[in-house]
Amino acid sequence: MQSTDPRLAALYDLDNPSGADHEFFCQLARELNPRLILDLGCGTGLLTAQLVAPGRLVIGIDPDSGMLDIAKQRQEKVEWVLGDSQLIGSSEADLVLMTGNVAQHIGQGDWERTLQDIHSGLAPGGILSFESRNPDVQAWRNWTKENSLSTRNTPFGELTEWIECTEPDETGTVMLTAYNRWEETGEELIVKQPLTFRSYEKITQDLADAGFEVEECFGGWHREKFTPESPIMVFVAKKVPRTQ
């Protein structure tokens, strides 16, 4: 488990407001009308709270206590859980979401286990939906200090921030490092985050191995067709019986 600095957690929603991605997942929920939704890696719960509806149970799960502290203040009708996919159990969920590129935050080994946990926790025919950046676009090449250095005023004082990133290793994992300097005090917070870029073929095979069938893979939040040039891959996969 981990805990994001409260100042950075409070800024998260300002930097990641609701947009086309949230509308995509909300529309999917409207179409499926699930009885139980699990939002795995829910963060501050900005999307999770929007999924609440009459007759529906929504559970938000996240391993970051700092993020969950904010989520718990947002919506009392959501059940907030500190942890990861191992806490899903046999919940018989109708829909499991992993948003905000959560899938890339899960490293190899843990990724396969997570898919198995989700499969076990979904009702027969249940749906898993998530997005992941398309490695062919090589987004990490733009994650440089030159492209990201900025200073802004925040409720906690003037903040200078930038990011740097390594090249992918043999598993497709890069190390993203975020630098945060509070100008008034000179305090620096450095946050390192591994992100794994998986190809369409890799994700599709991993889903099949875990007992899922890909129903759709979109190349954008407006359900554009996925192409090799698409910046993201938005998967909608259905639970099917595992082959022996």
Image (cartoon, helix red, strand yellow):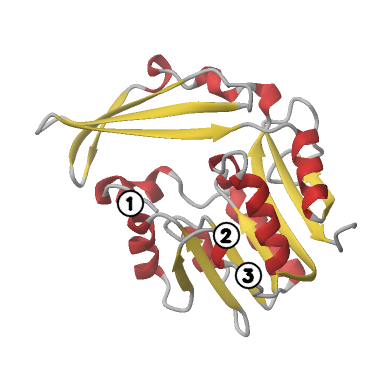
Amino acid at the residue labelled 3: Ile
Label 3 or label 1, whichever comes before in sequence order: 1
Residue 145: x, y in percent? 38, 18
Helix, strand or loop under label 1: loop
Q: Quadrant of the C terminus?
A: bottom right
Relative to 116, does residue 12 appear above or below in the rendering?
above
Quadrant in the picture for residue 57: bottom right
Say if 10 sits above or below 187 in the image: below
Number of labels in the image equals 3
Residue at 74% of width from left, 25% of height from top? 229
Distance, label 3 to label 1, CA atoms, is 24 Å
Q: Which mark is residue 155?
A: none
Secondary element under disc 3, as helix, strand or loop, is: strand
The residue lying furthest to the front in this view is 244
Q: Residues within 10 Å of mark 2 (few under 14, many from 20)?
A: many
Which numbered disc, 1 or 2, marks the residue that appears first in the sequence? 1
Q: Which residue is tagged 2?
A: 85
Q: Residue at x 47, y 58 (%)?
A: 62
Alpha carbon separation for disc pair 1 and 2: 17 Å
The residue lying at 53 percent from left, 26 percent from top is 174
Residue assigned mark 3: 37
Q: Which residue ends up furthest to the left in the rendered image?
A: 185
The x and y percentages for residue 207 are 77, 48
Query: Reading the chain from its start, which is encountered first: label 3 or label 2?
Result: 3
Q: Which of the two residues, 213 or 85, is positioned nearer the viewer here?
A: 85
| Up/down of 70 relative to 114, above or below | below
Q: Which residue is mark 1?
A: 3
